[in-house]
Image: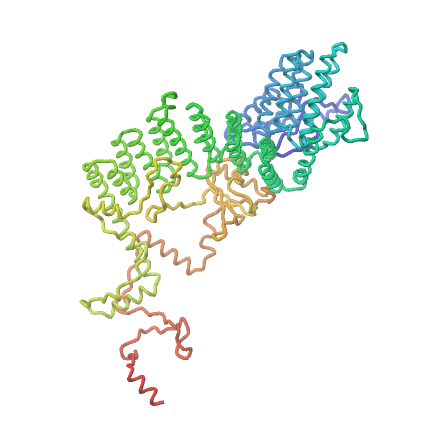
Amino acid sequence: MELVKEDEDDTNDEGRDDEVVSVGRTSSKGDVSSPSSSDSESDEEAAEEVQIGALQQQLEENPLNYEAHVQHIHHLRKLGHVEKLRQARESMNKYFPLSPKMWQDWAKDEATLNQGSENFEEIEKLYERGVHEYLFVPLWCDYLEFVQEHDPLVLECAPGGLAKMRTLFERALTACGLHFSEGSNIWEAYREFEQAVFLTIDGSDNEEKVKQAQRIRALFHRQLSVPLVNLRSTLTDYKLWEAEQGNLNDVNSEFDGVPSNIVSAYQKSLEMGNARASYEAQLSNHDATEADRLQHFVNYIKLEDSIGDPARVQVLYERALADFPVSSDLWLGYTSYLDRTLKVSEFVKDVYSRATRNCTWIGQLWINHMLALERMSASEKELSTVFERAIQCSFPGVQEYLELFLTRIDGLRRRISSTVAKEDGLDYSLIRETFQRAVDYFSLQVVSINDLLHLYAYWARLEGALGNDFVAARGVWESLIKKRIIQDICHSWLRFEREYGTLDDLDLAVKKVTPRLQELMAYKSQQDSKGSLSTQKDGSVAVIASQKRKANKTYGDKQPPAKKRKDVTIERFETSIPVPTSTSSILDNVNQQEETLQDTGDHEHNVKGVEDSKLSKTKIFYTDKCTAFISNLSVEANENHLHGFFKDSGGVTAIRLLRDKFSGKSRGLAYVDFSDEEHLAAAVAKNKQKLLGNKLSIARSDPKQGRNKSLPPSISSRSQGKGNLSRGSEAPPREESRNTAKPVRTITFATPRAVAKPLGWSKRESPTDETTEKPKSNEEFREMFLKK
């Protein structure tokens, strides 16, 4: 059988284009096609084959290219390559969840190709996989119809078949029965099935007929108690059915023949439906933008959450995720809600699994997944599998990887400390191995010293407290100071030895720390001297005035205490601490330092670890060598939206969203770093595509342009001069500067206009002792006024 394209509207699922091809064979209007049409069809098929080959090559190079998977399936289905089409769909589902429409098309294709009962179970499994991914009422309806038409036991109305069908209908009601706009389709299909069964019962079996009629009546009563669209027509159908059963009622009376408890439930359902009508109208507005529809869902969810019906909140989250499957905010909100309210472990596991498949780049989802598994007392194998999958994902920054490693270590520490360790065969070596993996990973990344210090401090504490190996704990500190010469690291090691070690251990630590501190102070002193030279070349008023006072003094004059220089910067003051050389002086220095780590042994009580230190900040510089510049972003867009937008391009290593430094709001601009030129080119090719309703402008970032172009010549030359100084190439001092004092700026504050000269006006010649007027005494001022 051939698979060909039909005329059908394209559907989009949060940027995911579904293929719009269905099964069947189309015939031309005439029985005999012309040679020209045959040639054109051959050319089209050849072009399709070329396209398929190119897409296969793309997927071999990057199997995470979502759009390439979609197009590959589309072209294979168009040409009718059945076996390749199955493989392509399986390959895509290995990496991504398929959209509801893609599952529906796949199941229909297989059902059409395999009419016999021998493939019934395989197609049934396919439907099961589809309804598991997303909440999609049409797919459930197709599934129910397929089982009714192809299951031999159901067709024979055998007891086993009827029980199976009723179980399937109840599952469908659990998943979709509360869907306000489409849930009634499942209810009606269920009633029609039971009514069909009623007609098959032998007329002489009155007991069975009464029992079956009661099933149908119970379904009507259940449906009338649920707020759904067209609830009034359901009540009318119920009264007509009761009349058919011989239960007379007044057609003109709305509730004649309806039990009072059902009337009460029906009226309450109408009130609930009226309260939700405005929200449903907003969701059904096809002219609304994606951002607006997402916000409508969020508002609707808040309403249901405030009412407090977990089942309705759950269904509404599922509806929203079917439309916005890559919205990380929705998945985070959904999983957080389930953690708080639902205690069904298998269902929570399933939702977390779906969340991490849809939003692989959200580290918080993986962390929450691991914590949820630990709450459920999951096995070590299950926890380890989730962790290994998580560290293989691409996250926006290094912080996500650090939190993942620490969460894994936290869980191992808690479980090893409890009785679970014996059951799972856990020991401390697994924690040590995880720490070592983290250290090896972060050695290749740019990590802040505070995060690194927290990781090593946590490791050292666990080596002593849980592993009972203080030699290994000291080895952790020693390995760190060999990699990073930071004052805080040295003092943290000394603090550790004071709290856990002997006096000999402390002396040994001081012996190893002292040369590192001396090296650090020497480096800082060198940087301070360069900074002082740069300050002098900038022409600071305070520095020039101080130099002038020094030039007029004779050698040997003692500087008065009140005239000492006051232009020492805060940074220099903080780093000009003398290097201690003895054990006692070092320990005094440690006591004066602000503590950088709390004594708590658990990561979740000390997530951020240590406070920022000016001496230990590691600034990240971006070269923009393989970077795209994004403009015209929506103010609602965040890093997660950009990650989802460039997911098909792949290769994203970092996202920098530019924000206003005062308000913190997005400026509509961003830089996106890519791993190589190929991924960057693919990203630039998405120029003019829409994200959250805005058409983006995407261009390659060129750091060579615009950095000094927009600066005035004086500023540009000044920055170049500073760069030369930082590399150590000092300009030779001018000869005349040794003998001639530099002119001082005239300060005109609080000076009469007649006396003050315009700002910027000065003479080249410095004032001499003869031309400079000496200060007048009080007697001289008195004589001046008396003369007048």
Residue 163 point in image, percent of width and height: 64, 15
Q: Quadrant of the C terminus?
A: bottom left
In which quarter of the view is residue 470 placed?
A: top left
Q: Is residue 584 visible?
A: yes
Q: Nearer the viewer, residue 130 or 605?
A: 605
Q: Taking 538 as reference, is 615 above or below it?
A: above
Q: Position of residue 330 (x, y in %)?
A: 55, 36
Please tell me in which quadrant of the rendered image residue 261 appears.
top right
Say if 498 sits above or below 570 in the image: above
In the picture as drawn, the residue positioned furthest to the top comes out as: 204
Q: Is residue 72 left or right of residue 547?
A: right
x and y, in percent, of residue 401 in the image: 42, 35
* Residue 16 seen from this side: no
Where's residue 469, x and y in %?
A: 27, 29
Q: Residue furthest bottom?
A: 787
Q: Nearer the viewer, residue 547 or 404?
A: 404
Front in this rendered view, residue 80 or 613 = 613
The N terminus: image quadrant: top right
Total count of labels: 0
From this viewpoint, which residue is outermost toward the front?
260
Q: Quadrant of residue 206?
A: top right
Which color scheme is applied? rainbow
Question: Is 616 drawn above or below residue 91 in the view shown?
Answer: below
Along the line of sight, which residue is nearer the eye, 784 or 669? Answer: 784
- What residue is rendered at 39% in x and 73% in y? 748
